[in-house]
Image: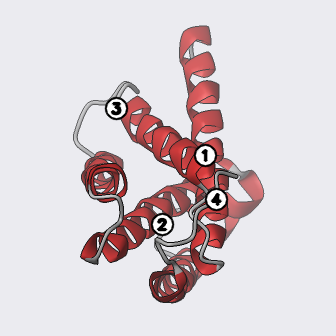
Amino acid sequence: MSTGLLIFTIVHVIISLVGIGSGFVVIYGFLTAQRLDRWTAVFLAFTILTSVTGFFFPFERFTPAHAVGILSLLVLGAALVARYQKHVAGPWRTTYVICAMVAQYFNFVVLIIQSLQKVPALEALAPTQSEVPFLATQIIALAIFVGLGIAATSRFRTASHSAA
């Protein structure tokens, strides 16, 4: 791997981790009925950057990672409209929460996949990513995000304002 590509990879990983970390803070805000406007801005910006920078890696063919990046950007576009143009009013509140949750889920699933590919101890558990540990991890992550999404949609209220 060239030095430039290594640096780009490190920057991409840092951007991704900031997006994931801030995404969990935003989910906490949903669950506690707080908007957390600054955290939301960080989450949306870094999650968009994660998807965009992912397209700058060298590739020879279209991969599932590209599909996830495209889907993530579409979901994030809807989240931006719901949050900043429609001000999470009426049904846009639910749209925003669901889109933010889906974007966070995509980021988290990519983290799982990358960890299983790059961390030797984890790679040994699922070398081809078709083994039970890989599938179980995906199912557990999906179940957790569905549960969090349902709770977040019911608990997040637009009347709450917090700039934290």
Label 4 sits on residue: 162
Cα distance between the residues tagged 2 and 3: 19 Å
Label 2 sits on residue: 105
- The earlier-in-sequence mark between 1 and 2 is 1
Amino acid of disc 3? Phe
The residue carrying pointer 1 sits among few (fewer than 14), some (14 to 19) or many (20 or more) residues within 10 Å by Cα, namely some
Q: In this view, does 149 lie above or below 18?
A: below
Q: Nearer the viewer, mark 1 or mark 2?
A: 1
The quarter of the rendered structure image containing the N terminus is top right
The residue carrying pointer 4 sits among few (fewer than 14), some (14 to 19) or many (20 or more) residues within 10 Å by Cα, namely few
Cα distance between the residues tagged 1 and 2: 20 Å
In this rendering, does residue 27 appear at all? Answer: yes
Residue reaching furthest to the top: 3
In this rendering, does residue 117 appear at all? Answer: no
Frontmost residue, 128 versus 117: 117
**Horizontal relation, residue 90 to residue 53: left or right:** left
Q: Nearer the viewer, mark 1 or mark 3?
A: 1
Label 1 sits on residue: 38
Q: Is residue 32 above or below residue 44?
A: below
Q: Position of residue 24 (x, y in %)?
A: 64, 63
Cα distance between the residues tagged 1 and 3: 26 Å
Image quadrant in which you'd find residue 9: top right
Label 3 sits on residue: 55
